[in-house]
Image (cartoon, rainbow, N blue to C red):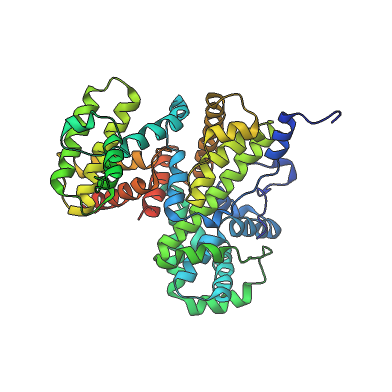
Amino acid sequence: MDGPMTTKDQSANQATAPHRRPIEQLRPHGAARLLGISLDDEDTGESHRDETMGELFEAHLDRVWQADEGLRRAGPGLMRQVLCRSGLPTPPTLGELLLDRQTKLGTIKQIRDRAKARATRENSEAEHAVMTTIYFAAIAHGLVHRRMKITTHSYASLESSFEKLIRKPWMPADLIELFQRAARLCRQQ
Amino acid sequence: MRRSGRTEIGGSQSRFQTTEWSLMHEFGNLSEEQRKTVLDELLGRYWKPVYCYLRRKGYDNEQAKDLTQGFFHEIVMGRRLIERADQTKGRFRTFLLTALDRYTINAHRHETTARRHCSAGTVALDDTADAASLVARDMDPQEAFTYAWALDLLHEVLSQVERHCTEHGQEVHWQLFYLHVVEPIISRRESTSLTELCSRFDIPGTIKAENMIVTVRRRFQTIMRERVRQYVASDEDVEQEIRDLMEILSR
């Protein structure tokens, strides 16, 4: 090729010198996820929103959970900042509650109810998807940590929903594990 | 292990994509040399799952390799197994696993047979399966077989997807797909952000990058389904076979 390399040429050259991890490092659950790609209907273009979805979902999980709606209206993270500055213990975030096996069942049911209500109200597709995920995460928590089905959905239907959520590229690893455990429990029913 | 290429049954002028069932059923019409080619083809494709199964059954590395060679020799050369191989009854993976179960029941007899025949195969069994069998050490033999089967399937499909991208001037497409989708799953780490990838590969925006990834994802889906179709009974079985593999691997 004549002349100095352009950035594009450099990019292409970088692309032709791949560093590949051996497939033998793939764990069984990872293999299941890769196989799941062949079943996804993501060629509708849904995948182009993965990064946005990931950021939106993380923002919700990082919010402080409060039964009192008034405090929530103060803005996400604001109360935590205030409490941190004052040296008081900070309340858990939504994400922490969903992943903590010690979270009270009553709190999990509140999360479930609020997520369900928000999901039906949301006009934004992305927000609807986030609320639906939180809804199912609460149900998964009930199954895994309390061995209780806190929904009228059948086990088969729940398993299918959990499997779909597991395959979402923007799903955090901790929640994937929760959904996987919940799906296994559903299969055993 | 050196994988043999597609089997040229019927001579060099008639190269065609064979299915596992057609390999088995054409066997009676083949010459001695062609039979050996079929043996190498099947061994090349499926030795790792069989090896992992045997390791989980308690055989050491060398015993498992000998038995693997012996098993395929019996599958291909042994008339009984071929006559029992009925495509309409299900998937080749299931047939192979059932045959392997029966084979290990008489392990001592097969060990003796394997020592006689272990030099018959021309495919050298390397040690890469040991990495997979280490991961599978907490699985039962059938799960270990399925895990190794899935690894081989994914390796083959990903390699084919990469080759396709390269042949069609889509190396950057492949890199995006690999770094954003595949590598995070293998390494169990966070995905490289599209913003960073756009900067690295000089792509004008994340929407463009997303579309490039979708292109490769579609190719992955097509190739995966084509590969699975080769060892199931019908088109309708493809999706169920993939789901079954996922279900076993998610345990």
Single out the residue that lies furthest toward the right.
Answer: A2
Res. A70 image quadrant:
top left
Image height check: is B129 above or below A154? below
x and y percentages locating residue A28 in the rendered image: 44, 55
Q: Quadrant of the N terminus of chain A?
A: top right
Image height check: is B159 above or below B99? above
x and y percentages locating residue A23 in the rendered image: 56, 53
Res. A22 image quadrant:
bottom right
Left or right relative to B87: residue A183: left
Question: Which residue is at a point 68% across and 58% down the rendered structure image?
Answer: B2
Disc count in the image? 0
Q: Return the residue nearer the eye: B47 or A75.
A: A75
Is residue A160 at least partly visible in the picture? no
Single out the residue that lies furthest toward the top.
Answer: A123
x and y percentages locating residue B228 in the rendered image: 49, 44
Q: Return the residue nearer the eye: A26 or B195.
A: B195
Question: Which residue is at a point 50% across and 75% down the rendered structure image?
Answer: B59
Is residue A23 at least partly visible in the picture? yes
Question: Which residue is at a point 49% across and 70% down the rendered structure image?
Answer: B55
Q: Return the residue nearer the eye: B12 or A119.
A: A119
Left or right relative to B28: residue A169: left
x and y percentages locating residue A66 in the rendered image: 19, 38
Left or right relative to B155: residue B235: left
